[in-house]
Amino acid sequence: MQTQNLGYPRIGSQRELKKACESYWAGATGYKNVLQVGKNIRRENWELQKNLGVDVIPSNDFSFYDQVLDHSLMFGAIPKRYNQVVVKEGNNELDLYFAMARGYQKEGLDVIAMEMTKWFDTNYHYLVPEFYKNQPFKLFSTKVIDEFYEAKQLGIVTKPVLIGPVSYLLLGKEKEAGFEKIDLIKNLLPVYLEILTRLKSLGATYIQFDEPFLVLDLSEKEKSAYQTVYQQIKKAFPELKIILATYFGGLEDHTDLTCSLPVDVLHVDLVRSPEQLAEVMAKISKEKILSLGIIDGRNIWKNDFEKSLSTINTAIEDLGKDRVWIAPSCSLLHSPVDLEHEKNEEVLTLEIKQWLAFAKQKIAELSTLKQLANHEDLTSAKEKFVQNKLAQQSRKTAPLIHNAAVKSRIESINEGDAARSSIFEERRQKQQEALKLPAFATTTIGSFPQTPEVRSWRAKLKKGSFNQAQYDQLIAIETEKAVRWQEEIGLDVLVHGEFERNDMVEYFGEQLSGFTFTQNGWVQSYGSRCVKPPIIYGDVKRPEAMTVKWTSYAQSLTSKHMKGMLTGPVTILQWSFVRNDQPRSATCMQIALAIRDEVVDLEKAGIKIIQIDEPAIREGLPLRKAQWKDYLHWAVKAFRISASAVMDETQIHTHMCYSEFNDIIDSIAAMDADVITIETSRSQMELLHAFANFNYPNEIGPGVYDIHSPRVPNQEEMVHLLKKAATVIPKEQLWVNPDCGLKTRGWDETKKALIEMVEAAKTMRNN
């Protein structure tokens, strides 16, 4: 029995990649420095996995920004608007790559970034490939080949990892009518064959093809494409060992199809879908190896060795030891790097730490399970098994996990708790009278830039260099500056800027019981953006008000309306590492009640507009439509519970970004938020068609500029987008706002963009 890993975190143990890229973008360091940092991370990752005993180690799992973007560059799927970036003197392939990811606005050029959306049901974002009818592909970037050779020079023969041809096409978007993206497979497959030829010549034995769409609903044409692709690959390269990796769900009705494909190793996710094992074992052909994804690649809980060994032994009894591999369920991209960096017991207690495993520890678990299953080095392995069993028992019985009062409150929830007093039309009339906002009302999504200076205050408070009074004074000054500036440029609904907040989920988790945190538990969200998800280990409760202090202070500075800014229960759930000892829905309801208490306190403090952000509600949707109904029922209910205990005059906003809404628009309407703000600028307002076709009844703020790109759009561009929006949504329902919060942007670009945005709203009012 062998071990394999599907992918390892690429940010570096101390976020070296983030720092190198951001330094390069700022012009502080050169091209060669970024390349060297990437090379160092790859070497460290390969050597670590080798030293920990991984038998089949991945390459090409590293990326400077996004693995899907890597493939678009590799296949020459480069939108024509970037041609000018290529010919600019001094630009290199990496500059082109970053322009596709972030946009390009210098040297007289102004090019928008590619669209970005969520990677299946994770909080990772990928760059959406753009496809055109009869689009040609060619081998443009040799990254996958170069990195295989790089590892080989270090004495490590890796398995190159590629997104499978079918999944790559399905990840993209048709940018013109008259064709289906899957029809491009005949143009794309020859490039894959060329890559395999090059890899084979360098000595590659195993090639991993990631085909996560095999756990989604597929059309007949897409199913046929899978058969065509892998038959042709096998015919052209009978000696290569093809690993087909599926993850994030079970094969279900695609089991027959997948098991019939001519590949050598089939990987299945037994964390998300343990029940699929029996059917897959019954249908997999005798010459194939089955890779068991038994270690959770998306959560941080220590593996249950006893349970995993039972699964492994079942597979070995059925298939034989030589036909069984073990692996994490998916790439470890979604896990923090190394638990050993968590040194501060005041942040993460030893009791909770003993229940956790990060990427490095998961690789070690893999090796231990192999030893136990193969009966190798049993003295050491058995000792680890005993320690693992004690940790599992400790977690089940720990008193700090359970809160009887919280459980009792959950049981007493009734339907009335999830409904506003009046229907939207009645509320809207009362809100118009109370708020007196103009047409095309302007606002922002919540946060303003967190400068290095602001972040340093928080660090000094944690280190004890500042006391609370000193810190509060600085935050108060920064908040007042933001309020005065918003008044100056003429925004209609203001925000306090969130200068006291580290992260939109972490900030709330720090004030809720049942949560704990890490110092270095960073995971990549997109590009250089890394987040430290809180860990929900127990029952959730709000001990005291979390946002009233700073929101009330900001409101006291202005006669304009100040929005209360909260993160919604589904998003807090999705963007945390969640306990796996009870249903996710139960944990979500606990969070909903905590947010409900905060909403009530904000209203009591005189806040008339309260935003409850739910950018992750679409992300949490199960990958199979058959499972949507149950999720949407409890997700919508959780939001409504959090939002419904206020008067009709209090306006509830929500915010969503980087999601496709077409299939769940009725559930979004069922959330019954008075105003929804959404990301639409990268898609040039395409997302609004879902709201128009549904005849969305409530008010909506389509984002008019992309905050994930450093480029600053002008007034004319925003007016153009608003006019497009007004063709599908009645103008009486429209708000004007950015796509998302502005925390990661600089003040200079933020000020320029918001001034242009306010002027765009004025233009629309005068039309």
Image: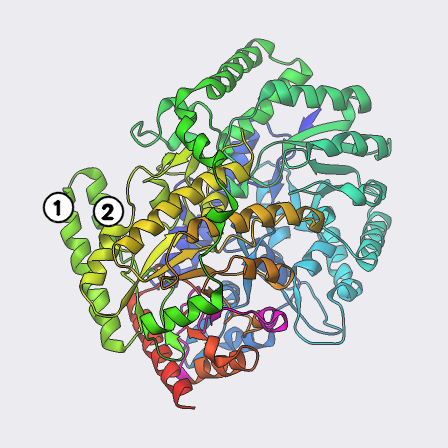
Res 130 visible: yes
Residue at the spot x=37%, y=55% of the render?
A: 646
> Foreground residue, 151 or 51?
51
Assess whether residue 700 is covered by the magenta stretch.
yes
Question: Could you tell me the amino acid type at mark 1?
Answer: Ala
Residue at the spot x=74%, y=62% of the render?
A: 188
> Foreground residue, 170 or 544?
544
Question: Could you tell me the amino acid type at mark 2?
Answer: Arg
Res 203 visible: no
At which x and y percent is residue 74?
Answer: 63, 60
- Circle 1 SS class: helix
Relative horizontal placement of residue 436, taking residue 478 as reference (left or right): right
- Do the numbered discs 2 and 1 sit on residues whose CB atoms are within 8 Å? no
How would you rate the neighbour count of disc 1 (Cα within 10 Å): few for under 14, some for 14-19, many for 20 or more? few
Please name which of the two marks, 2 or 1, marks the residue nearer to the observer. 1
Pointer 2 or 1: first along the chain? 2
> Foreground residue, 588 or 388?
588
Using the image, determine if residue 608 lies above or below residue 106: above
Kindly identify which residue carries mark 1.
469
Q: Quadrant of residue 255?
A: top right
View extreme (top): residue: 379
Kindly identify which residue carries mark 2.
458
| Quarter of the N terminus within the rendering | top right
Disc marking residue 625: none
Q: What stretch is highlighted in magenta?
A: 689-715
Assess whether residue 132 is covered by the magenta stretch.
no
At which x and y percent is residue 105?
Answer: 42, 75
Between the C-alphas of marks 2 and 1, the distance is: 12 Å
Using the image, determine if residue 429 lies above or below residue 382: below
How would you rate the neighbour count of disc 2 (Cα within 10 Å): few for under 14, some for 14-19, many for 20 or more? some
At which x and y percent is residue 594?
Answer: 39, 42
